[in-house]
Amino acid sequence: MKKVVWKTYVIAFVITSAIFAVSFGLSNAISEKRIQEIRSIENKISVDILSIETQFSLLEDLSCGEIGDSFLSRELASIGSRLQMMESERNPDDPEFLNLKKYYSLLLIKDQLLTKKIAEKCGDNTITILYFYSNREDDCEDCSKQGAVLTRLQELYPEIRVYPFDYYLDTPAIEALRSVHRIDAEFPALKIKNTTYYGLKTLADLEELIPELEEIKKAREEMEALKNATSTDQVE
């Protein structure tokens, strides 16, 4: 009887060990695949960054009529989304990730300065929002909500450009940006035109803070009405 019990324990141990080994091997395989995917994203971001830097140089030499709607911010937003995904899936203090994030932040600053230069040169009134957030634990409970609101704002109003910056990112450019715009360590923080706003701002709040959005709405409605009237005339 004791032999039967002993054999049962041995069989149970072997089965448990086999299950553990398979699970461990499968977990390692999935982790390795995820690492490869992240490396692929890193490489793609690096190439996109180089491409965008070249585009910056080209755009500076274009005339106002040739610039049109800038596609740089859309590409930067795409890179930002990928970096955000990486940030949620790996250690945010990873040196490689931080280097990419610093490089991306520099590109955002360059795009913001280019937008300002185009506005002065061409009389363009692009609306820009500088958004300062913090990734430090318990430092900004509303930052994720504010990011979602700003994403929705850009979906509704493509005319707006939002530039997100990690307040504590260790790079002289961010430090200079904080100093120039006098941003305190209170989050979320939004710099709209010459005014800084602290605390979570809803979509309704932002539409109230930016009167130009009402003008954009009216212009769209007039354009839509004109288009509908033209379509009706063509049918008749």
Image (spheres, helix red, strand yellow):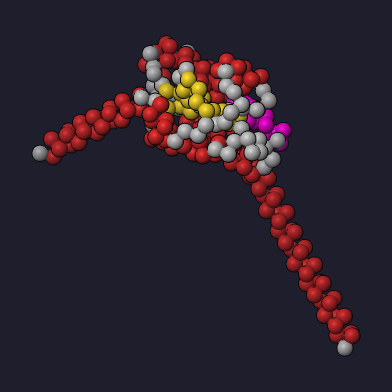
The secondary structure that dominates the magenta segment is: helix
> Eyeballing the image, is 153 above or below 111?
below
| Image location of residue 30, percent across then percent down | 68, 53
Seen in the image, is 141 located left or right of residue 90? Answer: left
Q: Residue at the location (35% across, 24% down)?
A: 212
- Dividing the picture into quadrants, the one containing residue 18 is bottom right
Q: Residue furthest left?
A: 236
> Is 179 or 10 nearer to us in this picture?
179
Query: What residue lies at 32% left-to-right and 28% top-to-bottom?
Result: 214
The N terminus sits in image quarter: bottom right
Q: Residue furthest bottom?
A: 1
| Quadrant showing the C terminus | top left
Residue 133 picture location, percent across and down: 58, 31
- Give whichever of 25, 159 is nearer the camera: 159
| Residue 35 in picture, x, y percent from top left | 68, 45
Name the side, left or right, on which 29 lies relative to 9.
left
**Visible residue check, residue 167:** yes
Q: What stretch of residues is rendered in magenta?
A: 94-105
Asked if the magenta segment contains residue 102, the reply would be yes
Q: Residue furthest right?
A: 2
Q: Is residue 115 visible?
A: no
Asked where in the image residue 17 lies, by quadrant, the reply is bottom right
State the residue lying farthest toward the top: 121
Which residue is pictured at 13% across the width and 35% down the height?
233
182 in magenta: no
